[in-house]
Amino acid sequence: MIHIEKDLINMKEEVILTRRELHKIPEVGFEEKKTSSFIVKKLKEYGIEVYENIAKTGVVGYLKGSVGEKTIAFRADMDALTIEEETNLFYRSKHEGMMHACGHDAHMGVVLGLAKYLSMNKEKLRDNIVFLFQPAEEGPGGAEPMIEEGVIEKFCIDKIIGLHVYPEIKEGRIGCKKGAMMAQTGEFDIDIYGESGHGAIPQKAKDSIVIAANLLSSYQTIVSRSIDPVKGAVLTIGKMYSGERRNIIAASARLEGTLRAFHEDVYRKIKQRMIEIAKGIEKMYDCKIEITFRDMYPAVNNNDHLVEDLIRAVGRENIDFVEPQMIAEDFSYFQKKIPGVFFFLGVRNEKEGAIYPLHNCRFTFHEDVLLTGIQVYINILKAIKGLE
């Protein structure tokens, strides 16, 4: 277990109350106005220098260290999901149809707790600290807009650290790995244009459903036959619709899906093969196929040295070295600019009923784990000599 120091234990009540207040007011991406106001108020209460309205609703807190040669950022995402909460907690969501079902309230609670701790121990702080509260992680993505507005350059951020509560790992344990830990992700829409006709006279039509079925089947060979099997990838078509009536050959069809990979060359290869196969099927059926790709988040790629710092900070015995996960996170945009480490904070606790997955309407966790998250951040700062 990770030892929690006395000063932090004395903060427990406020840390938990802060998280609960945030849990009550979930807001979707780029609309986190109440959340932003709450964060600003707390940071100012702790004597932290505050910058507002970055990437619309983002907030940055800044605390100068005594040496100030390096600047470390700790990131928390702010947005919630459009899910109706079914936890029956007395501090459940007050916003109908919205819920912090991905634990972003916990992430904010941890970073605000860190802000209070460091403000109370400012005389021991050597490095400058940026408390970075980012909007819209769930979509369309707030990390990239914050970077485009110059948050890294303005505050001279040298490295960035973030965490995500994770119910697949036992409460209090840390999950991490060097290199690619979470996948690059994108979406695609495929429109197939055939020619309608009577179901009894198929030779005079171009059946878009048959074309779609052939395309879908062919795409299933991309990962299994065009991609190196030791480089993970996923191509999933989750939605397919077409047709008007049972005896009418469909004039058009649409497929919608997602693709994910840990390496950019693999991601590009999948897209290339999708286009090549579609062109072949166009010729085969004398039809038209249009593909629209929407590239989303890059892969979360952890800096080796920062992972070593994390191991020294919490002890190898407290870390689960996880396999790469096909879920995605826009923390990755920061890592493309500066060294960063992202890790999972385990929250699974069967005794407390913390068993539901992320994005579930019953997702919850035992709040003592918030102190663990803060302590890990403190330990990392000590490990890199940013805090005495």
Image (spheres, helix red, strand yellow):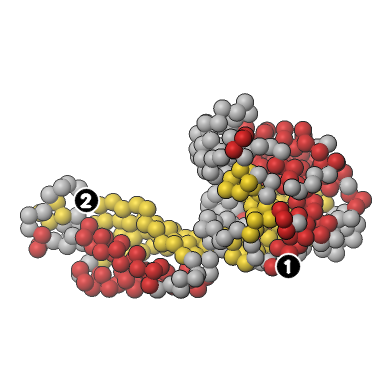
Q: Residue furthest right?
A: 123
Q: Residue furthest top?
A: 90
- Quarter of the image where one finds residue 280: bottom left
Q: What's under tag 1, amino acid-wise? A: His
Q: State the residue in front, 330 or 140.
A: 330
Query: In the picture shown, does residue 335 fall above or below 47?
Result: below
Secondary structure category for the residue under label 1: helix
Query: In the picture shown, does residue 228 fall above or below 129?
Result: below
Pointer 1 residue: 305
Tell me residue 221's x, y (percent).
Answer: 35, 68
- Quarter of the image where one finds residue 384: bottom right
Residue at the (20%, 48%) spot, across then down: 244
Pointer 2 residue: 243
Secondary structure category for the residue under label 2: loop
Q: Mark 1 near mark 2, Cβ–Cβ under 8 Å?
A: no
The reply, left or right, for residue 265 in relation to residue 112 is left
Q: Residues within 10 Å of mark 2 (few under 14, many from 20)?
A: some
